[in-house]
Amino acid sequence: MAKIEADDGHWEGEGVKNGQKYEFHVDPHTGAITKDKPDD
């Protein structure tokens, strides 16, 4: 399952990478991932 939402000028999302849940932030203007960390 994956989820993404707009929040405070960036997109926040949750998903699964390599079997582990991750949280990530994306710059809506460039599409660059600005944060990618395991979601504890």
Image: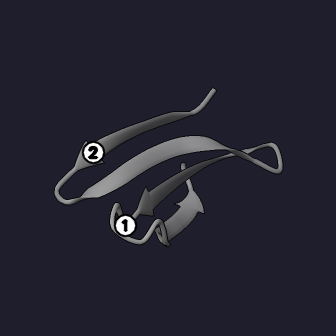
Location of residue 37 in the rendering, given as x and y in whole percent from the top left corner: 56, 63
Residue in view at x 22 percent, y 49 percent: 7
> Is 2 above or below relative to 26?
above
The kind of residue on which mark 2 rests is Ala
The kind of residue on which mark 1 rests is Asp
N-terminal of the pair, mark 1 or mark 2, is 2
Residue in view at x 35 percent, y 52 percent: 11
Residue most extreme to the top: 1
| Residue 25 as seen in the image, left or right of residue 7 | right
- Closest to the observer: 32 or 36? 32
- Residue denoted by label 2: 6
> Is 31 above or below relative to 8?
below
Location of residue 8 in the rendering, given as x and y in whole percent from the top left corner: 16, 56
| Distance Cα–Cα, label 1 vs label 2 | 10 Å
Residue 34: quadrant of the picture: bottom left
Residue most extreme to the left: 8
Query: Which label is found at residue 36?
Result: none
Q: Residues within 10 Å of mark 2 (few under 14, many from 20)?
A: few
Residue in view at x 27 percent, y 45 percent: 6
- Residue denoted by label 1: 27
Q: Secondary structure at mark 2?
A: strand
Q: Residues within 10 Å of mark 1 (few under 14, many from 20)?
A: some
